[in-house]
Image (cartoon, rainbow, N blue to C red):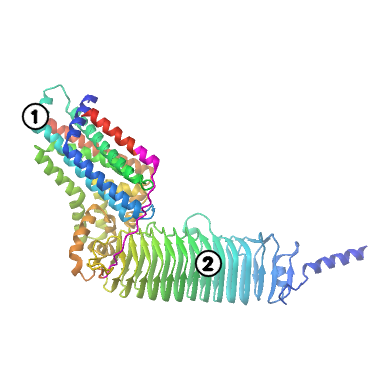
Amino acid sequence: MLLFLCIALFALTFQAFAHKPQEGTPKPYIHTGEESTLQKLIDATESGGTLVLDKRAYQGSFSISKPITIKGVEGTSIVSLETALEISNTKNVVIEDIELKAEEAGIVATGIHKLTLKNIKVEQGTAGIEISNSTDITLDNVDISGQAGHFATKGHAIAIYKSVNVQASESDISNVLDGFYIERTDDVSLTDNRIQDSRYAIHMMYSDKVRLDFNDVRANLTGLMIMVANDVSITNNSVKKNNTLNSVGIYTYDVNKMVFSDNELSENTVAMDIQDTRNMVIKSNFFSTNGTVIQAKYSGSVSIQDNEFHGNILTARTDEEGVLLQHNFYDDYTGKDYDGDGIGDTNYIATNSFGQWMVRKPVYQYFIESPSVATLNKMDTEVTDHNSLAIIDDQPIVMGKTFNTNFSINGWQFIGSIFVLIAMFIVRRKLI
Amino acid sequence: MSIQMILLECKQLLRSRWIQIVATLFAIVFTAILMIQQLALPDTDGFTRQTASLLNILLFLLPLFMLTIGSMNIASDKESGWLGLLRTYPLKMWNYVFTKYIALCLVFAGIIIFVFAVAFLVGSFFGGLKLPLFAVGITLLILVIFNGVSVLVGSIAKSRLHALAVGLGVWSVVSLLWSYIIMAIGTMTSENFLQNIVILSIHINPLEWIRYGYFVFSGQTAVLGPAFYDISKFYSSPLGLLFFILISGLWTVVSLISATVILKIRGKQV
């Protein structure tokens, strides 16, 4: 009997650590047992192997220092009072389908070559995912949400330092300090991510070869903040409702060679704040209902062409020559096109004295679009042609404005207003 | 102050061609701005150029109409001898002033309701019009404050022409010149000093006060920039709201009391 029990116990323990080959792969396979801790399972998996986790919560902090694929199923989670997963000095690590709840960071990775995080959900404590000194990083469908509260109490969702070749896509991030904080990292591609209610959606500095495409960035303090970068391409993004105090849709500082095209920016306090930026092309974007669209400081070579401007308060303000406005559509352009070539016959003056004052003394912003300034601007445009700092488009596009003239009667408003008008008519007749 | 007197004043005002022209002009401009916003722009909550246009129409036109019509109405009473006749009756001067004020408020409220109704009627053919709530609030505030100021201007003026001149003068100062003077001072002073005089200006210029009120109560103070964060935070608090109501009330009450005193003094001089 005793012998039988010993054999049974030995068999159970052996089963827990048994390696079964996975279909289609020669790598060893482990199926987790209820009694095993995750760290033991990781340690027991051969280098390059795949560990499939059960639908359960694993508690504690775990570390990885060898090539491994860890896959969860729906309901697999890691709960930790510290950092949930630490990955260091290895290559080919894949983490998939896991939810992380950690008091500190969800994942901290250092010195990794080829790290893939896929279908990861993080309920952020002090930080989401931190990666440093790594190469070939792929983040796919990483969702990170922070708690409500002041930004001072929050950390970055995804922070990447001193790395090369980072690709992130399909991530949903909200209520964090910065959605993506990327520093001294080259070859960055962020595609189709959605970031909202954070301090900066994407905050990047000291980076080369940056591609930001199809991201949806809204209701942050600042949408995209790109500083000290070279060779930046930002296309097909939606940057909206970054409209609190000091909010900016896109801020660039000390950026060289930047293409900003086919983006939609609306309802931002300032859509684009461009400082000390060189060789920048802003093309085919749609700017609507922003406070100020473009504010340029110390930026000498910015070309703004083929964009559409609708319902913005101020199109552009600058303190320096060199901002070129060409071939854009402005809904407040009042010129005519008598020769029918689609180009207005008179210049469009995007800036004015008041805009320049605002750049120099921000307190002037109080008067923005006040009755006095609206009048002043009308007079100002008549004499601004000769001002070297005025931003003038000598080829403004003239096209039919799009009006939503769908004819449909609103019965309540129709009857209500008719009733009020008749009542007023009767009252007036009675009175007089 | 009796209802009959108020109705009599309302009758006189409504017979005025000037009032009818004003109502028509205001209805056309207001409806046009709202329709452009409705048809040409996406549905936004923010402060857009069209929102600014709507706000400016209210801030520009309503005070102009109120200051000229209100002041000329009282000056007309002086010029025609009607006020002199009233003085022979046992009628308190504050009674006369408050009657005028209430009548002006009622007539302008009627004009505004008419304008809103026209705008809604036109908008109903395009799926319905959305009237920003701020437009109603700002209109009421303009109505309450500037009708009081117009009564004061009318009490100062000696004739209708004089009232028109003073009314236009006050309007041009509060709506245009005041801001230009402050902006000009700002070019010669430090930014901190400019900020302080702008804050002072908000409190002593009724038009700036109403404009600032719009930004605070529509939650759009970010438009004004970071320099006004502290004051905006105060006025966004319950205590700030109380203070705002108090100052708005003071503009009206002080104007009406001043008008009463001036008319009493002028009455004794005659």
Image mark 1: chain: B
| Quadrant in which the N terminus of chain B appears | top left
Q: Position of residue B196 (x, y in %)?
A: 26, 53
- Estimate the spatial distance between the alpha carbons at disc 2 and disc 1, rounded to whole Å: 80 Å
Give residue A170's quadrant in the image.
bottom right
Residue type marked 1: Gly
Image mark 2: chain: A
Identify the secondary structure beneath mark 1: loop
Q: Is residue A353 left or right of residue A405?
A: left
| A111, above or below A246, in the image | below
From which residue to which does the magenta span run?
A395-416
Residue at 38% x, 55% y is B42
The one of A366 and A428 positioned closer to us in this rendering: A428
Q: Position of residue B81 (x, y in %)?
A: 8, 29
Q: Position of residue A192 (x, y in %)?
A: 50, 66
Q: Which residue is labeled 2 in the image?
A: A158
Mark sitting on residue B81 = 1
Find out whether residue A87 is within the magenta segment: no
Q: Position of residue B86 (x, y in %)?
A: 13, 25
Q: Is residue A10 left or right of residue B151?
A: right
Q: Please state which of the two labelled residues, at mark 2 or mark 1, is closer to the viewer.
A: 1
Residue at 67% x, 65% y is A72
Find out whether residue A398 is within the magenta segment: yes
